[in-house]
Image: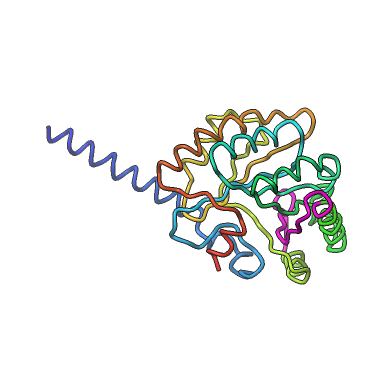
């Protein structure tokens, strides 16, 4: 009996250490751009409230984005979609539905270049061109920007601030673009969930990319996070909590 109690105590202690380590990975101190530019950059919310923000990049499309929207609507979960200008111009009706369903939208460039291999002027063009398409399709404007690949440096951040934009990163990367299974994607989120988390997922990809795992992971992930007491927020809501 004593051996059983000691074994249980050992495993409980080990589990606590694992959870602590996983949460500490997402500590804001790991994001120097957020520390140095707190009024411009956010990788996670600095809050103890059990809130979490689902974000989806690279959309819209007509294959995966509508399916994701269907699930979010059934579950009553708001999210933030970082849209590419080229795809908004091609699928304006899907972009419009995102806004009509109550979600927030952000700017994810027009052609998805790796910005640090281009120039500040190229970033300005990418943002302004996408801004125009989002406004045309949805009737709303956004001052949120997520750099393609998350690749951004100080000079680009400074220009974002000059343009009145906020740069948004993430603290949980599902790597769903690798066409992972729904179990792998949901377990990544559930294992790393923490107050103020920003989750990176994708609502579209290139023509041969299979994001079925992303779609199928959502319901289980959302159900369990709700059961754990988490509330889903958009990036604008999280930004307000953060500041």
Say which residue appears at 58% left-offset and 29% top-offset: 216
Q: Residue 160, position in %: x, y? A: 75, 66
- Residue 48 in magenta? no
Classify residue 64 as left or right of residue 121.
Answer: left
Instruction: Place residue 3 in its image quadrant.
Output: top left
Classify residue 132 as left or right of residue 229.
Answer: right
Report the front residue among 233 and 214: 233
Q: Residue 30, position in %: x, y? A: 55, 59
The residue at the far left in this view is 1
Instruction: Place residue 56 in its image quadrant.
Output: top right
Q: Residue 132, position in %: x, y? A: 85, 56
Classify residue 207 as left or right of residue 46.
Answer: right
Say which residue appears at 57% left-offset and 65% top-offset: 240
Q: Quadrant of the C terminus?
A: bottom right
Report the front residue among 99 and 44: 99
Say which residue appears at 53% left-offset and 52% top-offset: 197
Q: Which of the colour schemes (rainbow, by chain, secondary structure, one colour) is used? A: rainbow
Say which residue appears at 12% left-offset and 32% top-offset: 1
Which range is magenta? 134-153
């Amino acid at each position: 009996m004593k051996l059983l109690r000691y074994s249980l105590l050992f495993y409980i202690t080990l589990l606590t250490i694992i959870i602590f380590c996983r949460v500490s990975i997402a500590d804001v101190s790991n994001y120097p751009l957020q520390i140095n530019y707190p009024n411009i950059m956010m990788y996670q919310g600095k809050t103890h409230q059990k809130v979490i923000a689902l974000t989806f990049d690279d959309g819209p499309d007509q294959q995966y984005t509508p399916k994701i929207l269907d699930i979010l609507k059934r579950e009553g979960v708001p999210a933030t979609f970082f849209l590419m200008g080229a795809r908004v111009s091609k699928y304006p009706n899907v972009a419009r539905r995102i806004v009509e369903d109550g979600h927030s939208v952000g700017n994810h460039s027009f052609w998805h270049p790796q910005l640090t291999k281009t120039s500040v002027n190229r970033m300005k063009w990418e943002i302004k061109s996408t801004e125009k398409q989002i406004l045309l399709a949805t009737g709303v404007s956004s001052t949120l920007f997520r750099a393609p690949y998350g690749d951004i440096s100080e000079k680009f951040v400074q220009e974002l601030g000059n343009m009145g934009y906020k740069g948004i990163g993430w603290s949980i990367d599902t790597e769903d673009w690798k066409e992972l299974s729904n179990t792998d994607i949901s377990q990544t989120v559930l294992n790393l969930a923490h107050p103020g988390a920003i989750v990176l997922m994708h609502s579209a990809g290139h023509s041969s990319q299979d994001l079925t795992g992303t779609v199928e992971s959502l319901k289980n992930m959302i159900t369990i996070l709700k059961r754990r007491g988490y509330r889903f927020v958009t990036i604008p809501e999280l930004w307000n909590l953060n500041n």
